[in-house]
Every structure is written in C-alpha cells, then in structure tokens.
Amino acid sequence: EDQVTQSPEALRLQEGESSSLNCSYTVSGLRGLFWYRQDPGKGPEFLFTLYSAGEEKEKERLKATLTKKESFLHITAPKPEDSATYLCAVQLRGGSEKLVFGKGTKLTVNP
Amino acid sequence: DAGVIQSPRHEVTEMGQEVTLRCKPISGHDYLFWYRQTMMRGLELLIYFNNNVPIDDSGMPEDRFSAKMPNASFSTLKIQPSEPRDSAVYFCASSYGVTGGYEQFFGPGTRLTVL
C-alpha cells in the first residue's frame, strides 16, 4: 500500500532557529512529490513539486529536497509568519492525477 | 482570477438530512478534485474529474456520497443521508494537468457538522 509519513507531527522553533521537516514515502512508483502549506481555516497552498532524486527547489526561507525514499523541507531562520501546517503529498506513476497526502507537520515559530 | 470558490463555508445539519456542497473551479482548469480532511485521517481524495468526467471515485466512502460535474465551471458533492461521522472539512481543488504533475489549487473548504 502506498504510504506517506511525515515527522515530526509538531515542531516548535524560536525565530531564527533553522530546522527540517521530513516526509518519507513508500510507493510503487513516484511521479512527483508535492509540498503544501496550510494555514488554520484555509485550504492547502502549493509550495513545490519535486520529480527526481537530487532535485532541490527554494522559495524564500524554504528549501525542499528529494531522495529516493524521502523529502526534506528545510526552513532557514524562520519567522513567526512561517507558522503553519506543512503537508507532503505524492503523485504516483500510471497517469493518475491522484495525490496521497501525509498527515502534516504543524510548525510553530515563536518570536 | 478569484481562485476556487466553495459554498457554503459552514454547514450544520442533523443526522439523516441531505447535504449539498458546491464548487466552482478556476476557469480553464480541466481537473477537479474533492477531498475530505479530518484530524484522524488527514486529507483524503474522494473523487476527481477530468473534463467533467469522473475518473477515480475509489475514495468515496459509500453509496451515501455522490458527486457530479454538469459543466466545466460547477461541481457538487452530495451526502444523503448524512451521519455524524461525515463531519469534516471538505475541500475542492482544481488543476490544469495536460501533461500531469501540475499543482492543485485548493478552495477555502466547507466545514460540515452533522449533529
């Protein structure tokens, strides 16, 4: 069965304290891995798509990386406005547009 | 563009009643998705359409759930009869996936409470 596991479930950081979120996956064939950000009371907002091992993408203080078994979302010098739940999702080979989501990591950045 | 539009934003109903959730995707997008989010199970795909045709409904929990997309700018998700365990946030998303892999844009969700 295709599975996506995110860790930790929750993470508290002080402003400026860099860290990483993990997304590990067990799938039959990966077509793409997606990262989304979700603020309370809102729908997920797209951040990145990664397609192959070794690929990296950056946006402001966020950098996403991908290996054959997992992806990391690195947060450098976070600010309170980075507080949100970060969701990872995989899209499988075979032509389906279906995304399988992990349960997310709730990030809190204290000033 | 206004983004994906969902209505209502909140719905409170009693067990046994029919519930209809509505979604207007982003203009020009050819894929539409319905998701359900709960604390226990996270975000789960219920069904998705391509060019108004249902492609994968394997996530629809049971026959009480049905979804339609009569045209490119409108979709509904209906629950009849509703049960307390259907309480969740329901999201609609759309994407432009000619070659696949394009990001899905989510609406603000409908928070459903079944008493």
Image (cartoon, rainbow, N blue to C red):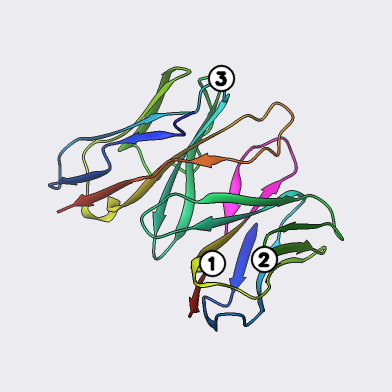
Q: Amino acid at mark 3?
A: Asn
Vertical placement of residue A4 versus B3, above or below: below
Q: Residue at x 49, y 72 (%)?
A: A80
**Marks 3/2: CA–CA distance:** 37 Å
Residue B59 in picture, x, y percent from top left: 48, 44
| Label 2 sits on residue | A61
Left or right of A2? Residue A94 is right
Residue appearing at x 62%, y 62% in the figure: A4
The first of marks 2 and 1 along the sequence is 2
Looking at the rendered structure, the secondary structure element under dot 3 is loop
What residue lies at 77% left-to-right and 51% top-to-bottom? A29
Coordinates of residue A59 in the picture (x, y in percent): 69, 57
Q: Position of residue B88 (x, y in %)?
A: 32, 53
Q: Which residue is mark 1?
A: A82
Query: Relative to B35, is B115 above or below?
Result: below
Specify the subunit that label 2 lies on: A
> What residue is pinned by disc 3?
B51
How far is disc 3 from disc 1 in space, using C-alphas? 36 Å
In this picture, which residue range is highlighted in magenta?
Answer: A89-103
> To which chain does the residue with label 1 belong?
A
Give amino acid for label 1: Asp
Amino acid carrying label 2: it is Arg
Provide residue B101's location: percent of width, then percent of height: 70, 39
Decide: marks 2, 1 in contact (CB < 8 A)? Answer: yes
Residue farthest toward the top in the current orientation of the protein: B71
Q: Callout 2: helix, strand or loop?
A: loop
Which type of secondary structure does the marked residue at label 1 adopt?
helix
